Structure formats: C-alpha cells, structure tokens
Image (tube, rainbow, N blue to C red):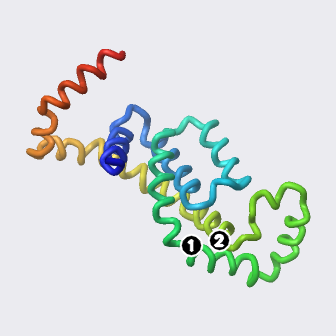
Amino acid sequence: MFYLKFIRDFVNILRAGQTPAQVAGGFALGSILGLSPMLTLQGAIVWLVLLALDVNFSAAGVAMTFFSFFAWLLDPLFHWLGYQILVNAGPLKGLWTYLYNAPVAPLTRFNNTVVMGSFVAALVLFFPVYAGMKHFVVAYRTHIHSRLEQWKVYQVLDRSTMLQWYRRIRDLKG
C-alpha cells in the first residue's frame, strides 16, 4: 500500500499548480537529504534552505524517500569517494585538521568517509537532478498526462464508484 501512496503522491506533485522550477527545486533538495545522512549540520542546513525557499515540500519528501532507498546501495562508492577526498587529497589535509579542531565543524561528521562521499556526490548531482526533474515535469504536463488519460485502465479507474465517492468526500472539506 505504501508504494501506491508513493506513486499517487508523485503524480499529484507533477500535476500540482506550482511551477516546474519549484517542483524540481524541492526534488533536488530532497535528493541531497536522501543521499547524505540527515543527522548532521549540513543536513540541518539543507532542511532550513528547504523551508526558507518557495519549493515544493512534497517533492522533497518523495525525492528523500526515493534517494534514501538507493543510498545504502551506493555506500561503497560513497566510502571510496570520501576516502579519496579525506586521505588521498594531500593538499587538503591541513584543512581537514583545522576543521576537526574547529568548534562547530565536527558536527558535520565530515571525517566519516561515507558522510563526506555521500554529501559530495549529492552536491555534484544537485544540478543534473534539478534540470532532469524540471524537464520531466514540463514533459509530463504537456505530453505524458494527456496520453495517460487515453489509457483504458485510467478511464476505468477514473469512472469507478470508489473514486467518485472519494471525490465527493474530498470536495466537502473545501
């Protein structure tokens, strides 16, 4: 049942009245939260940015769920990337030592290879995720949704008595 609700929420986000940029912005920020650990200082900062900007909060939730589902599969890659940044990048060793001794920087858990690698990967993927999602929302609203409405399965579900009953109850709230 969770997967059906997840798909329904995602389709509602695509059909929502917000602009494609707002939906894509929320999705891209949610991808950062999904790929990197949230209980860090940078996770709190991303949450604050998400709340401060005019982006789709539901899209962020969908992206966070989607990307966190696959993030654990990518942990070996994140570990390798973090190891390369923390250990094999010689000129940065002084910076890492300074940050480790700073009062607030250890709250980022940057010295953990998986945290460092996942956060760097999330930042690198931010703009491609944003651009791809923006393109997908525009394509869905202009082409894909009209094609879905022509499918027999969609038409049968749209005319079902259960859906009609749900719409009547939903409209009573407003």
Q: How many neighbours does mark 2 have within 10 angstroms: few (below 14), some (14-19), or many (20 or more)? A: many
* Residue 153 appears left or right of 44: left
What numbered label is drawn on residue 27? none
What numbered label is drawn on residue 114? 2
Identify the residue at image location x=69%, y=79%: 83
Lower position in the chain sequence, tag 1 or tag 2: 1
C-alpha gap between disc 1 and disc 2? 6 Å
* Residue 56 appears left or right of 169: right
Q: Secondary structure at mark 1?
A: helix
Q: How many neighbours does mark 1 have within 10 angstroms: few (below 14), some (14-19), or many (20 or more)? A: some
Q: Nearer the viewer, residue 19 or 107?
A: 107
Identify the residue at image location x=24%, y=24%: 167
Q: Quadrant of the C terminus?
A: top left
Identify the residue at image location x=52%, y=55%: 31
Vertical side of 69 occupied by 148: above or below: above
Identify the residue at image location x=76%, y=81%: 87
Confirm or deny contact between disc 1 and disc 2 (CB under 8 A). yes
Amino acid carrying label 1: it is Asp
Vertical side of 170 occupied by 138: above or below: below
Find residue 157 and report its image quarter: top left
Label 1 sits on residue: 75
Find residue 145 and report its image quarter: top left
Q: Nearer the viewer, residue 165 or 84?
A: 165
